[in-house]
Image (cartoon, helix red, strand yellow):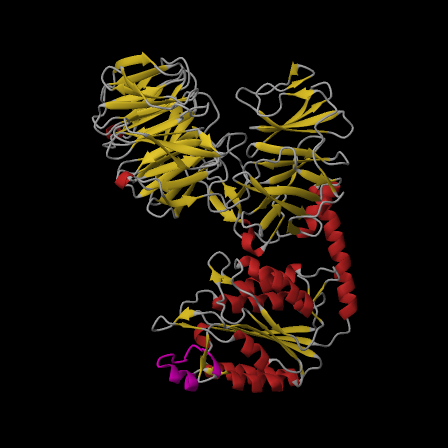
């Protein structure tokens, strides 16, 4: 690894990782066989997809730094699919920009091509894979690298008068480029690449996209400033024909592509109908009638031909789709986080910032929602009330602030960067300052137009608001996040991302303290740089102990200081712990835990269910600050869970309960069950499942289980947790499941309360992301978060409410817990 890490983040940085890009896709490419699709995004990742079905195969994380360092603008894959070349704002220092070469299969960063004078806008491999061409920002032209010389620079033409956004290889090795200086250039085949022809673009002043027809006789060119598409002769660059774009909206055809057989010409960019961007297609080598295909909601950036006449389309939404040759959709990838566009006038917040009303935008239709930080709830269709207020946008003479690069105050331009566009406005209630949201920053100004501060935006600042108390700025960003900033200096205090399912969310502080719904686990991650010579890593925030702190989130808005928020929260925790300890100081009751989990017959995490439940209750419920004088756990996993061992464990539990007074036994079984001849059985490790009649003699009879639990309950209370209702593939691949409703009724009795993981006809689910079954995952979450009355204790009713609300969320409505309650009291100390 290089020791030179200047410009890189020297500590982990939090990133949102919902399984797809969170910022505009700028470029896409595929290998020659159309197996792999690669995409580059402003979110500082490059992603590799299976081009046949759209599955995400790998995420390549670029080394990142402050500002724009790490944003990917260009990507290309070698014809054989082995290499992925990435360019963009990789270094942030003139003369030190670079191109990364990754191994597609392993994700390893294998080489850097250094010393580029400016940002790379486009990359393309030659058809034989020998050359890699890069077009650059500014007047820096084009560079070509030779694989035969281990990717040493083989050719450079820096004699351009503006940025180049287009570069393409012909089948015979010739190279063509476009430039915003208005010129189109063709170079002879490598390795010399001498310029053979250049012309002024015939149909627009800012040519961008270009593509050689596979037959090599035509070059298509698209423009940024006009919807025109030009067809040029590839020898003389003489205009052969301008495509029929009559009636297309103003804007540009940013990219063009030929189908793999060269019969159809495609173009895309900003052309839209009814708010949706369209791919434009001309058959008959561009001479046929014009067709359009409904695509994305935002600008189409990249068109890539695929086998069978298919087309890959990437857009800024972010959005990625594969069209068949007839324009039907084969698959689409779209962001799992909420789309927060269309609310520059409507983003509403409470006076203290603890409540924010926003909308899920879907093709211009908004579904209103409310996030309440105090209650940690996400509510759809919130009531119209006086708790929140929309942004104030009058009172100061700010003009040209909607999608304009020259907003003004009293006619005087406000200072923005080049290419920076203002999109949103909020004025402080006192009228002495205001905030602009732009493509690059959230900016605060005083009433005279003096800059107070800019804060870099993680994505376009679509909407902003200033809280009624004047202390906070709330901004909605294009990466799907809402973020709270301090009004005095713009520092970020809190962030929140609602997922598109309209149920799940994550909220966090920049230090990594967070709260999340069960279905959003894994979405928030730490990005960890490994220097310039290695791909960056990422770590799920759940893997870091002690960071889940929902109690801190509202406090940080109240204090504007994370250290003060932590201090206040710790004081409250100590107070609560003292109350709990005092209330239980004379308690003699013990907690007995028997946790059994079998990962077989298609289950992978049932043994972890047993381990994690036993560990959590043992660690938290015994001793001075726990609920019980002692916590006595027993855990049986996999081959330990034989029919005989289950009976022995239950008998031992009965003897231990008989020695105590007012003890509680928690019994978990996580595995499979079956109904045979109207009798219920749990499937132990040594249960013979085929033929099914053998289950009767080798399984654990629920009738026997009931008898043992009845004896145990004579000496105390029993909470029975059964996650044995899931369907799994047994020897003949048939699905087996217990009747969960019947099971609860049969086992529940005096002193025995039964929770089951699902209802009749439902499966129970597990997931590698949780490393648990959904039922156990939510039950463990309940121990942390079900203490709604904040008395430090969690009762049966608290558990039921939490499971009833959250288990359907984490399983997308496919799993509903069941309860038979025969006692209702406080059972556990909150974690």
Residue nearest the viewer, comparing 434 with 494: 434
Q: Residue at (63%, 47%) from the top-left corner?
A: 513
The quadrant in which residue 402 appears is: top right
Residue 472: x and y, percent?
71, 36
- The answer to whether residue 812 is left or right of residue 164 is right
**Residue 567 visible to an observer of this rendering:** yes
Residue 7: x and y, percent?
51, 30
- Span shown in magenta: 679-698
Is 726 placed above or below 351 here? Answer: below
Is 688 magenta? The answer is: yes
- The answer to whether residue 591 is left or right of residue 194 is right
Is 34 magenta? The answer is: no
The quadrant in which residue 409 appears is: top right
Report the quarter where the C terminus lies.
Answer: bottom right
- The answer to whether residue 629 is left or right of residue 695 is right
Residue nearest the viewer, comparing 525 with 177: 177
Q: In the rendered picture of this protein, how many numbered marks are placed on residues?
A: 0
**Residue 111 visible to an observer of this rendering:** no
Residue 173: x and y, percent?
23, 25
Report the quarter where the N terminus lies.
Answer: top left
């Amino acid at each position: 690894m290089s020791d030179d890490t200047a410009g890189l983040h020297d500590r982990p940085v939090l990133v949102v990782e919902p399984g797809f890009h969170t910022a505009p896709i700028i470029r896409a490419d595929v290998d020659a066989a159309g197996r792999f699709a690669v995409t580059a995004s402003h979110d500082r990742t490059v992603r590799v997809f299976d081009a046949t079905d759209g599955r995400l195969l790998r995420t390549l994380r670029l080394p990142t730094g402050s500002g724009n360092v790490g944003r990917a603008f260009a990507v290309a894959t070698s014809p054989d699919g082995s290499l992925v070349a990435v360019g963009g704002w990789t270094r942030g220092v003139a003369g030190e920009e670079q191109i990364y070469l990754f191994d597609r299969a392993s994700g390893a960063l294998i080489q850097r091509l250094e010393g580029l004078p400016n940002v790379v806008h486009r990359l393309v491999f030659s058809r034989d894979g020998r050359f890699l061409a890069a077009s650059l920002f500014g007047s820096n032209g084009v560079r070509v690298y030779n694989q035969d010389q281990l990717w040493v620079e083989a050719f450079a033409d820096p004699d351009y008068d503006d940025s180049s956004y287009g570069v393409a290889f012909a089948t015979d090795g010739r190279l063509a480029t476009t430039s915003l200086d208005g010129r189109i250039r063709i170079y002879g085949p490598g390795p010399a690449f001498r310029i053979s022809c250049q012309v002024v673009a015939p149909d627009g002043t800012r040519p961008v996209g270009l593509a050689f027809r596979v037959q090599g006789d035509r070059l298509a060119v698209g423009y940024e400033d006009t919807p025109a598409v030009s067809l040029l002769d590839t020898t003389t660059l003489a205009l052969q024909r301008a495509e029929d774009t009559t009636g297309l909206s103003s804007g540009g055809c940013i990219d063009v592509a030929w189908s793999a057989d060269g019969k159809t010409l495609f173009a895309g960019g900003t052309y839209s109908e009814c708010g949706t961007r369209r791919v434009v297609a001309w058959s008959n080598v561009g001479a046929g009638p014009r067709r359009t295909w409904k695509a994305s909601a935002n600008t189409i950036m990249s068109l890539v031909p695929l086998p069978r006449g298919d087309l890959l389309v990437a857009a800024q939404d972010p959005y990625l789709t594969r069209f068949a040759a007839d324009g039907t959709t084969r698959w689409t990838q779209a962001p799992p986080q909420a789309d927060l566009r269309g609310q520059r006038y409507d983003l509403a917040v409470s006076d203290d910032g603890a409540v924010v009303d926003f909308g899920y935008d879907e093709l211009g239709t908004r579904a209103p929602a409310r996030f309440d930080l105090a209650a940690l709830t996400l509510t759809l269709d919130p009531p119209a009330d006086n708790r929140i207020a929309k942004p104030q946008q009058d009172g100061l003479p700010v003009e040209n602030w909607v999608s304009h690069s020259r907003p003004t105050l009293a006619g005087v331009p406000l200072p923005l960067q080049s290419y920076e566009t203002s999109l949103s406005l909020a004025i402080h209630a006192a009228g002495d300052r205001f905030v602009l949201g732009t493509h690059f920053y959230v900016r605060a100004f005083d009433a005279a137009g003096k800059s107070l501060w800019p804060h870099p935006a993680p994505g376009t600042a679509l909407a902003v608001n200033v809280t009624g108390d004047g202390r906070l700025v709330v901004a909605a960003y294009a990466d799907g996040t809402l973020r709270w900033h301090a009004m005095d200096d713009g520092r970020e205090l809190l962030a929140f991302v609602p997922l598109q399912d309209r149920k799940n969310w994550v909220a966090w502080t920049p230090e990594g303290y967070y709260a999340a719904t069960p279905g959003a686990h894994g979405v928030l991650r730490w990005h960890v740089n490994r220097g310039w010579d290695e791909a960056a890593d990422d770590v799920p925030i759940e893997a870091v102990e002690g960071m889940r702190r929902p109690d801190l989130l509202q406090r940080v808005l109240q204090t504007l200081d994370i250290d003060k928020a932590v201090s206040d929260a710790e004081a409250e925790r100590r107070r609560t712990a003292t109350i709990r300890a005092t209330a239980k100081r004379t308690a003699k009751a013990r907690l007995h835990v028997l946790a059994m989990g079998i990962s077989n017959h298609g289950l992978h995490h049932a043994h972890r269910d047993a381990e994690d439940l036993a560990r959590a209750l043992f660690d938290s419920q015994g001793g001075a600050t726990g609920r019980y004088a002692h916590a006595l756990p027993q855990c049986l996993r996999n081959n330990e869970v034989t029919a005989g061992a289950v009976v022995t464990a239950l008998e031992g539990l009965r003897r231990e309960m008989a020695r105590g007074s007012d003890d509680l036994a928690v019994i978990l079984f996580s595995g499979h069950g079956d109904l045979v001849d109207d009798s219920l059985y749990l499937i132990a490790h040594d249960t013979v499942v085929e033929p099914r009649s053998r289950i009767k003699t080798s399984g654990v009879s629920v009738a026997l289980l009931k008898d043992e639990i009845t004896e145990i309950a004579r000496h105390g209370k029993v909470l029975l947790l059964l996650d044995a209702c899931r369907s799994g593939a047994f020897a003949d691949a048939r699905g087996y499941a217990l009747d969960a409703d019947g099971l609860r009724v049969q086992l529940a009795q005096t002193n025995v309360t039964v929770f089951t993981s699902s209802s009749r006809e439902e499966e129970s689910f597990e997931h590698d992301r949780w490393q648990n079954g959904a039922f156990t995952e939510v039950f463990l979450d309940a121990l942390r978060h079900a203490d709604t009355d904040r008395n430090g204790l969690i009762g049966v009713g608290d558990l039921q409410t939490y499971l009833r609300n959250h288990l359907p969320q984490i399983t997308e409505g496919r799993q509903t817990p069941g309860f038979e309650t025969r006692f209702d009291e406080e059972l556990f100390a909150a974690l």
